[in-house]
Amino acid sequence: MRVAFSTDVHYDVNHLDARTYFSQQKEYLVQHDIGVYVIGGDIFNNFQETVRYVHDFQAYLGDEVRLYFIAGNHDMVKNVTYSELETLQDPAYLHHRVVSLPGTDYTLVGNNGWYDYSLAPAELDKTAKDFNRWKKAFWIDSAIDSPLSDADRMARVLDQVRMDLHTVAAQGKKALFVTHFVPRRDFLIYAADRPYWNMATALMGSSHLGDLLAASPVVDTVVFGHLHHRDAPLMIGDQLYLHTPLGYGLKRAWEWQTSDFMTEWRHTLMIRDLSEKSAS
C-alpha cells in the first residue's frame, strides 16, 4: 500500500478553486498506486469549507483512494468550536483516531495538535501570559475558539496521543502519525534579529509531543506541517520525519518553487510505501 500526505495547501489563501484540480489530483494518485491520501491541515480558513471540500473530493475519488484530514489552525478560525473539533464524527476526520491500513501492519494515527510555548527560545525570558497576550494581539489563532489555556489544551493533546499509541501497541502494529503543529525544535529556525518570529515560535507546537513520540516504539513515521519551509526527510532514531508543506504562492508571501499549483502539490506530496502484512 502507498499512503500520501499533504499539508498547508491553503486553497482560499492562494486564491485557488480547489475543485478544478480534482481530475488532475485523482489521476496522479491513481497512476501512482496511492490508496490513501491524508491532508494534515490548513485547507481553508473555514472549517465548514474544509469539510465540504473533503466530502466533495472523496465523492470524486470514489473507491479508488481513501481520503482523510485533520484540522490546522487556519481551518479552526471560522465556523467551528473547540467542542466540535473534539467530537466531530466524520469518517474522513482523523483527529484522535486510530485507523488500520488494510493488508498492512500499519495504522494511521491523527491529532490536530496544539502548542504550549515549549518551542520558544529560552533566552526570550517570556511568561505564558506574555505569549498569550502577544498571540491575542498579533496572531491569527486569536480567532480560534479555545476554552482552555494553551498549556491545558496541549496537555489534552498529549493524553489523546498517549492513548492512541497505546491502542496501536495493543494491536501489535506500527503508527504513521500525522499532526499539524511542530513536534520538535529540530525543524525551527531561530533568528536573534527577528523578534516577531521568535515570539511566534512559541505558537508553533510542543517539544513535549516530540518527546512522547520519540519514546514510543510503535511510531514509524511522523508527518506534520505548519512551518512553511520544506525539509528533506529526516531519520531521528528509528522514526522518519516528513515535513514538506505546500504553503503560499502569493506575491506578498512567495513560498513556492514554481508558479503552478499542481507542480507544487506533486513536489510536496509525502509518500510512504508500506509492506504487506507479515504472516501470522
Image (spheres, grey):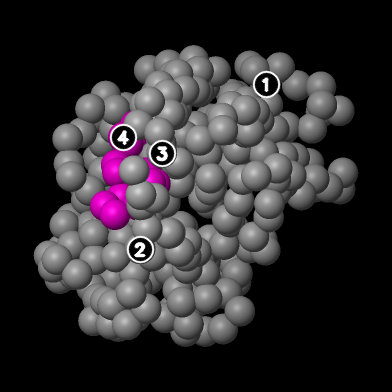
| Above or below: residue 104 compared with residue 233 | above
- Tag 1 residue: 130
User: In the image, which residues are magenta?
Assistant: 94-107
Residue occupying image coordinates x 53% and y 61%: 245
Q: Nearer the viewer, mark 3 or mark 4?
A: 3
Q: Tell me the crowding category of disc 1: few under 14, some 14 to 19, or many 20 or more residues within 10 angstroms, Cα based.
A: few
Residue occupying image coordinates x 71% and y 17%: 127
- Tag 3 residue: 173
| Mark 2 vs 4, N-terminal side | 2
**Gap between marks 4 and 1 measured at Cα:** 33 Å
**Gap between marks 2 and 3 measured at Cα:** 15 Å
Going by the numbered disc 2, the residue's amino acid type is Met
| Mark 1 vs 2, N-terminal side | 2
Asked which secondary structure carries label 3, the reply is loop
Residue 1 - label: 2
**Gap between marks 2 and 4 measured at Cα:** 20 Å
| Mark 4 vs 1, N-terminal side | 4
| Mark 2 vs 3, N-terminal side | 2
